[in-house]
Image (spheres, grey):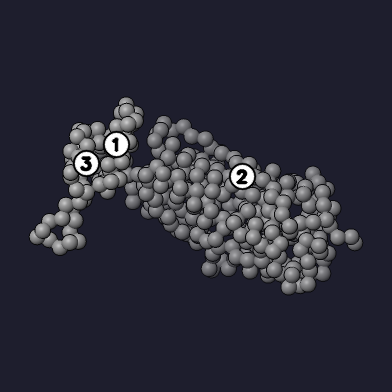
Amino acid sequence: MTRARVTHPSKSASAVKPVSLRTLAEYLKLSPATVSVVVNDSPAAKAIPKHTKDRVLQAARKLEYRPNFFARSLSLKRGFMVGVLVPEISEGYAASIMGGIEDHLLREGYFYFVASHRGQADLIQEYPRMLIDRAVEGVILLNTPAVQVLPVPVVAISGHQRVRGVTNIGVDNKKATFAALEHLVQLGHKRIAFFKGHHGSSDTEFRWKGVLQAALKLGIEVRPELTVQLERDPAVPGPSVPEEGYVNVRKLLATGRSFTALFAFNDISAIGAVRAFRDAGLRVPEDVSVVGFDDIQAAAYLTPRLTTVRQPLRQMGETAARQLLERISNGNGRYPQVISLAPELVVRESTGPAPAD
């Protein structure tokens, strides 16, 4: 029987020769062409019987065969690499979406580069070109504006821009914000405070429009003195952090204006808000209700557990990766401009009836 690896006596034990395609074919008593078609999952593999494909894949695992990436790329004229551009990768929103992107790309045998631009305009402009210079076949933009037309397929998550060559994937912010405010109104809340998103977030404008439209329909006044915008230090842009929610609740309380509920831009700021209310001697939800947005993993494990609008974050990542690979494979120039996923209001413990005046 052919061994998985052949060690040359004249060399050290670490000098190990990988199993070749020809060795694997001889072991299976099949032609190298048949084995190559199966292990590279080429279109011609559809004509090969399932039991033969199973034999090949089982032997490849047993002998620890690894396809030659460069030979595969040259034969198919494909690089099997994509680029992902993100503001940053931190706990919550970005990490959950990246998990979905990674799952699909790994299943399909794609390698990927991730570049973090930290909100810097020059990097947002330059990084896509650098990724293309490294032979990526497509680019995924996560909460990153499409500032130029690229020569490869592009899928944007929460991009909202109609740019040639870009497929946009996101949730319906109008439905999401209406569901959250309707929930608070049904609980009797009329004086509601708001966290507006960062200037650098592509979701900020569209989610705020949803808030204003929902408030108008529900008869809720959006008071400027009860609205604060999350701000990061523009010199050192970075991820949203709970401290933003904590500091801005302190600002709201310092105004002396009365409110019974807070609708936060995201779960991270809502987490900081809950802590600030408790430190100020206010109970959540008995004295003030809090609603977040995203439904990150930590939201269900807070005290109290956070009511929030769920974005299907992992599904958004998987959908983006799937759509990108379909566009790469098809190459016919046709693509959907917008793919909208449904949000879901998740009611937990941080919301309750409005306190009596």
User: Which mark's residue is nearer the viewer, 1 or 2?
Assistant: 1
The numbered mark at residue 24 is 3
Decide: few, some or many residues near mark 1? Use Cα within 10 Å; few <14, some 14-19, many ≥20.
few
Residue at x 46%, y 32% (from the top left corner): 334
Tag 1: residue type?
A: Arg
Mark 2 element type: strand
Lower sequence index among marks 1 and 3 = 3
Mark seen at residue 55: 1
Kindly identify the amino acid type of the residue bearing the numbered disc 2: Val
Q: Where is residue 68 in the image (x, y as percent from the top left)?
A: 25, 46
> In the image, is residue 46 above or below residue 126?
above
Residues at discs 2 and 3 in contact (Cβ within 8 Å): no
Q: Where is residue 17 in the image (x, y as percent from the top left)?
A: 18, 53
Name the secondary structure under disc 3. Answer: helix
Image location of residue 20, percent across then percent down: 20, 45
Give the foreground label among 2 and 3: 3
Asked whether the beta carbons under mark 1 and mark 3 sit within 8 Å of each other, the answer is: no
| On screen, residue 34 above or below 61 | above
At horizontal 31% and vertical 34% (from top left) the residue drawn is 53
- Asked if residue 52 is positioned above or below residue 7 in the image, the reply reads above
Q: Is mark 1 on a helix, strand or loop?
A: helix
Nearest to the eye among marks 1 and 3: give it. Answer: 1
Nearer to me, 351 or 341: 351
Q: How far apart are marks 2 and 3 (CA)?
A: 47 Å
Frontmost residue, 121 versus 139: 139
Q: Residue furthest left?
A: 10
The residue carrying pointer 2 sits among few (fewer than 14), some (14 to 19) or many (20 or more) residues within 10 Å by Cα, namely: many
Mark 2 / mark 3, whichever is N-terminal:
3
Gap between marks 1 and 3 measured at Cα:
11 Å
Amino acid bearing label 3: Leu
The residue beneath circle 2 is 171
Q: How far apart are the two marked residues, 1 and 2, measured between alpha carbons? A: 43 Å
